Image (tube, rainbow, N blue to C red):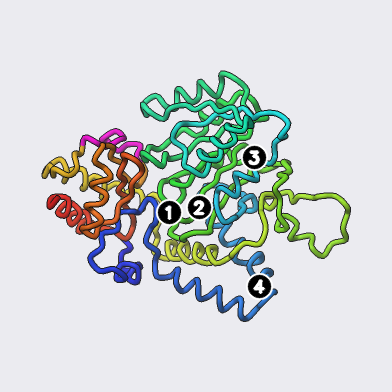
Amino acid sequence: MLKPHYRRFLEARPGRLHFVAHSHHAWPDVTRDAVLQYWDDAARLADRKWEHVFGEIVPRAQAHLARLFGTKSPGQIAFSASTHDFLVRLFSCFDEGRPLRVLTTDSEFYSFARQAARLQEQGRFHLTRVPAEPFSTFEDRFAAAAAAEDFDLVLFSHVFFNASFVVEDLARLVGAVRSRDAMVVVDGYHGPGAIPMSIASLENRIFYMGGGYKYLQVGEGFGFMHVPTGCTLRPVATGWFSQFGLLTAKPTGQVEYPDNGFRFWGATWDPTPAYRFNAVMDLYEREGVTPEKIHAHAHGLQERFLSGLERTRPRSLDASRLVTPRDLARQGNFLTFRFDEAPALHAALRAQNVDTDLRGDRIRFGFGPYQDAADVDMLLERLGRL
């Protein structure tokens, strides 16, 4: 699909099959040029680079993300080094004097799951976890739980990281939340850039967060979050970037917050990932690449892979171990197989110069725009050797 644009990454280790396209994507060549561009801008502008970053680089990145989100409010998008940074700021909006009632699932990524478990140990969180499986009834069960009682915080994934199952009806789950005062957070890490999506109808209600490490092919350090329009929360964990537009104004003696996404910015942030992100999005625009096309491409490779497994029946991987429904109707851009020998298969594939990803008894195969049918056939061939 876009393989020629990843020459440097693909040639860095000849013979490698990089099927970790749900986690560490390959980076297109334009991202290397973007890193050098930031260095040159820093040398040219020195401390004045912040005027350039916030006057041009950040607005471009916000506009790209707003387009991916399907919203018309780019100014509501904040950036940070990670989604965990945003979680800390979100949690700090609540009064620590009482435990928070939190509704979530049993399949959230570690950034939230570990932090929430630790806060539960301290008695600061009372967690209600809805099982993600069976997937066929997840939305019914989660909506019922959201409507059953008042929660302070509701957090769930757009695409489950440990299965690749897509939660399609975000509006239904958000609308089911009984308390209008509840903070609703959607972890969208496996959504933007991977699947067609729009949060336009929810942009005044939800926090939608994610990062560039995966499908946006930016690497580390590019966490982003859409802040609901009209949000007036005042996070206690606040940094000087939230005051960036007022640095030269006369002090008022009060802690003031902007009326847009800047209220959830933190402190000094490395702009390099934003340069990389803009370069990737500019490349996609030039090539006419959209999330719809990327998802269709990944879906086609997934189907080729599963059909190949069913046809050749390698002893190393049984297609029936797929966690999600075989029809792939609500599949993200990776496949997850669950079985006891997954760690052994992960190690054996690594010895065959095949990169995959392991989470306990689940092995994940990701499919991206720099892969083609020949890569899938080589993967099947190497599986057949084991």
Query: Crowding near pointer 4: few (<14 within 10 Å), some, many (20+)?
Result: some
Residue pictured at 88% horizontal, 54% vertical: 252
Pointer 1: what residue?
214
The three-letter amino acid code for the residue at tag 2 is: Gly
Q: Earlier in the sequence, mark 1 or mark 4?
A: 4
User: At 70% from the left edge and 42% from the top edge, which residue is drawn?
Assistant: 230
Q: Which residue position holds label 4?
A: 49
Say what amino acid the circle numbered 4 marks.
Lys
User: What is the secondary structure assignment of the residue under circle 3?
Assistant: helix
Asked if labels 2 and 3 touch by Cβ distance under 8 angstroms, the answer is no
Viewer-nearest residue: 385 or 144? 385
Q: Is residue 6 left or right of residue 51?
A: left
Q: Can you give x and y, in whole percent of width and height, for residue 337 in the image?
A: 28, 40
Q: Is residue 330 magenta?
A: yes
Q: Give the Cα separation between the discs numbered 3 and 2.
A: 19 Å
Magenta-drawn segment? 320-331
Front tag of 3 and 2: 3
Earlier residue among tags 4 and 2: 4
Asked whether the residues under the numbered discs 1 and 3 touch, taking CB atoms below 8 Å apart as contact, a structural biologist would say no
- Residue 271: percent from left, percent from top: 58, 65
Q: Is residue 308 above or below residue 52?
A: above
The x and y percentages for residue 366 are: 32, 50
Label count reads: 4
Callout 4 touching callout 3 (CB < 8 Å) = no
Disc 3 marks a residue whose amino acid type is Phe
For badge 1, the amino acid type reads Lys
Q: CA distance from mark 1 to mark 3?
A: 25 Å
Q: Are marks 2 and 1 in contact (CB under 8 Å)?
A: yes
The secondary structure type at the circle numbered 2 is: strand
Main secondary structure type of the part rendered in magenta: loop
Residue linked to disc 3 = 91
Q: Which residue is mark 2?
A: 211
